[in-house]
Amino acid sequence: MKTTLISRQDARRLLLGAQGLLADPTRKATRTTLARLIEQMGFVQLDSINYIERAHHLTLGSRLDSYRHEHFAQLLETDRHLFEHWTHDASAIPTVWFAHWKPRFAHYETKLRQGRWWGPRLGEQPEKTLAEVRERIAREGPLRSQDFEHDRQGQAAGWWDWKPQKVALEYLWFTGELMVTRREKFQKVYDLTERVLPQAATLTQPSEAENIEWACRTALERLVIATPKEVADFWHAITLAQARQWCERAAKSGALAAVMVESANDEKPRARFALSDWQARLRKLPEAPDRMRLLSPFDPIIRDRARAARLFNFDYRFEAFVPEPKRQYGYYVLPILEGEQLVGRIDPKFQRERDTLEVRNVYWEPTIKATKARRKNLDEALARLANLIGAAQVNWQ
């Protein structure tokens, strides 16, 4: 049989639709709406950089105009509809999937114990340190790293120089004994898992086959078209070999279709797997909202840089960790989504002391003309961003 060729535009639409960027951003943003959106996306990445706004607020605010920060906090810290743990990075994840983190907890326990970084930093008596941290939280309740004394009081300590108690807290979090119950100024507050998620903590750990099935199926529901590597990378829960074997079996059973997808820059079409009903899904998708949106650098459609280049012809590099003289665009540059296209990037900063969203520059893609209509749409997008972060005004430098 001839392999179906999917256009780059259709593949792009399917991804945007799956990741909530074709839905009406003006719809009412209740906690229920937000919970459904995050489950549709799979998870939302957390990041400590607060140059403009936390990454998860930028990601969710770009999809819901009336997004409220407190709704996210309630879902994560009160309702426990979400929990914080690791995918490819720290993320807020629907608690309905908590059981599928239990294999990950067991994996981390083995991996971290054998790792060269963790062992030495737990100190000369690692079991004693772990027991003391565990027992103190059990006795006193939620604690932060800074609640544990150490002999470097008043000195900064980077991630490479954590005190043993901080290492113990992270170890117990990675391995599932502790959960992050909330954050205070973005600092983790840890508590026992059975107190944070009492029902989820008792769930039975899935078998390896069940976990692979879940990881692949849920990833493809949120990508629609993907390579086995993209499937494996979505949750970072299974190996590439496991994802490949699952995709090949699913294609034989008819659950997936082997397809070719066009790429940008006249590259040859590439082999992918698609959900077998991708055409029906495509027909049901609404037209993209007629507006510009400023995306987080950690937005799901940007995170995979190679995929963004293939589908959007957009080459994005996060330059916060690039030395300033070597930066091409800026420290924390936001991609600009216009309809279904990434048309440029903008270099803003929230000057909190002046209550101002400051815009340093905008960089349009080579084929994009900065028309009056585009500048107006960009001004409207900046006004929405200012409203999201609580800036009183927008100033161009």
Image (cartoon, rainbow, N blue to C red):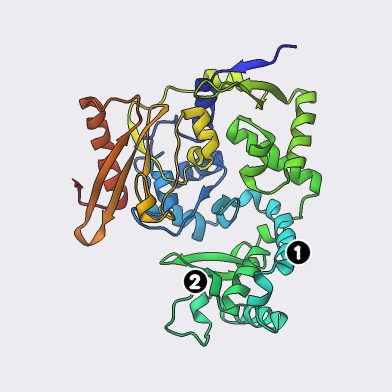
Q: Residue furthest top?
A: 1
Q: Is residue 348 above or below residue 368?
A: below
Q: Which residue is mark 1?
A: 110
Q: Which residue is mark 2?
A: 158
How many neighbours does mark 1 have within 10 angstroms: few (below 14), some (14-19), or many (20 or more)? few
Q: Is residue 366 left or right of residue 172?
A: left
Under tag 1, what secondary structure?
helix
| Alpha carbons under labels 2 and 1: distance apart | 25 Å
Q: Quadrant of residue 280?
A: top right
Q: Is residue 183 above or below residue 231?
A: below
Q: Position of residue 310 (x, y in %)?
A: 53, 29
Along the line of sight, which residue is nearer the eye, 396 or 171? Answer: 396
Q: Quadrant of residue 70?
A: bottom left
Q: Position of residue 177 (x, y in %)?
A: 67, 68
Specify the amino acid type for callout 1. Answer: Thr
Q: Position of residue 359 (x, y in %)?
A: 25, 46
**Which residue is depicted at the point 39% across and 53% down?**
69
The N terminus lies in which quarter of the figure?
Answer: top right
How many neighbours does mark 2 have within 10 angstroms: few (below 14), some (14-19), or many (20 or more)? few
Q: Earlier in the sequence, mark 2 or mark 1?
A: 1
Tell us which disc is closer to us: 2 or 1: 2
Q: Is residue 148 above or below residue 45?
A: below
**Which residue is depicted at the point 38% across and 58% down?**
50
Q: Position of residue 269 (x, y in %)?
A: 60, 21
Specify the amino acid type for callout 2. Answer: Gly
Along the line of sight, which residue is nearer the eye, 121 or 40? Answer: 121
Q: Is residue 39 left or right of residue 275?
A: left
